[in-house]
Image (cartoon, helix red, strand yellow):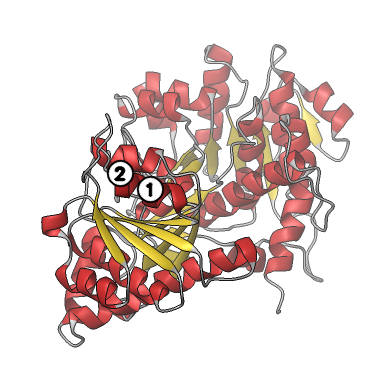
Amino acid sequence: MQGVWTPDQVREAEQRLFARTPEPAVMRRAAHAVAVQCARLLSEQTGGVAGRRVALLVGAGNNGGDALWAGAFLRRRGVGVTAVLLAPDKAHPAGLEGLRRAGGRAVPAEGAGADTTGIGAEAADALERADLVVDGIVGLSARGALRPVAAELVRRVIVPIVAVDLPSGVDPTTGAVDGPAVSADLTVTFGGLKPCHVLGTGAVRSGEVTTVGIGVTEELPEPELSLLDAADIGENWPVPGPEDDKYSTGVVGIAAGSATYPGAAVLATGAAVRATAGMVRYAGPAADEVRARWPETVATGSIGDAGRVQAWSVGPGIGTGASGRDVLRFVLESGRPVCADADSITILAEDEAMWDSRDPDAPLVLTPHAGEFARLSGAELGADRVGEAREVAARFDAFVLLKGNTTVIAAPDGRVLVNDARQAWPATAGSGDVLTGLIGALLATGVEPLLTCGYAAHVHSLAAEIAAHGATADGPRSEAGAPIGASALLDAVPAAIRAVRDAALPS
């Protein structure tokens, strides 16, 4: 599990580090790490470093200082380096001197011969001739989009960009982008991941993220967010042992679908089956369709006839009328852990009295998309998805899985997990039904609800990627990928589980 720290946490850790290590020494460590990664990318392009050209986009403050020192290290390896200074009078003095001593050049962004956009001739030439660009425009303290001159410089870049700490123009705390911003091929960050590296569009704009300790890691407190990796999930994904039977490996109930939407029942039930639940009990109007597709399921037409379960998944396709409300009420009164999705969330948002049916000792997982979340919270979802998910989780004493390309999972006690899919293949009708079935199956095995949601979200997004690329857990794979339906995602769930379990094996 990887930690994710807020900018405030990182700045406080840096101050503790500076108390025992001079700040200039720490900056040079950071810059050296940036230079190493730049040299790696340059070598991958043509097999060499000497004689290549790098342009540095340099703003004021320490982020620009990191870029300047990185340029000095690259210059010593024979790289031609030109720093384009967005604020020449505020450029980091020691970094600028270090670059010039190493033989690098510095030119103003708005120097002589400026064109109609305000970019000087030397700055334009540096970008045009560059094989790589380093983004050192702004750092963790910045907010908002790039200013016009910086935006124009970035717009002209057609070569790989390496961002120092974070892509400029991306909000460090939320990952939001509200105007021109850098899209990096690689981000070199220091101490630990920041929210912008894993949230929202910032996660995409960060590209590949490399974390370098530089001494800060030891000073960091408990992380604000956590990011599960495949090995975490594979090591803990429940599988049958020699003493297990169908009852001890989890009995999950699925209350989904209707005569109008039988597909929701088939998909949610199938996900529970594919997630290796010991037994899946389906209850609802689509019993015949479920039996036809999943003969191993115990299917009944009435929720009252479902039999004993250890957890419920409820909501997809049940409708919001009287019958759907009766189903949800029955499930909430069962005293079992519940994953409530789709129509269940709409009912809960519209009918406050429905909350009185809930057993307060039974965990409740809510899995809203942005529209459903707005119904629950009473307001449109804003940029701070973590903060808003936390608030709703605390208000309803529930685990909230806020869907999106970056899924945010909040516990009532404030803990947060993040799953960054980095692709949009799950954005297809019925995909959420599959996720609901996965969550229910894991809840039935007794996995802690927050981890249940994290495991299910990761396997769900991985299954979508496997399906889109025509791959199994062990290949072959198409690089381009192609749009998929929820059925293809469902079929890839076993391969995704194998993949995470393989990741947990000793290397």
What's under tag 1, amino acid-wise? Asp
Q: Observer-nearest residue: 76 or 460?
A: 76
Left or right, 457 with reference to 280: left
Residue 378 picture location, percent across and down: 30, 24
Q: CA distance from mark 2 to mark 1?
A: 6 Å
Where 289 sits versus 178, above or below? above
Q: Is 304 located above or below residue 96 in the figure?
A: above
Q: Is residue 174 visible?
A: no
Residue under pointer 2: 121
Q: Nearer the viewer, residue 147 or 493?
A: 147
Residue shown at 38% from the left, 31% from the top: 356
Whether the residues at callouts 2 and 1 have beta carbons within 8 Å, the answer is yes
Query: In the picture, residue 470 is in which quadrant?
Result: top right
Q: Which residue is mark 1?
A: 125
Image point (81%, 28%), residue name: 290
Question: What amino acid type should be assigned to the residue bearing mark 2?
Answer: Ala
Depth order, front residue of 291/490: 490
Residue 165's x, y, as percent?
Answer: 35, 61
Look at the image and tell me in which quarter the C terminus lies.
Answer: bottom right
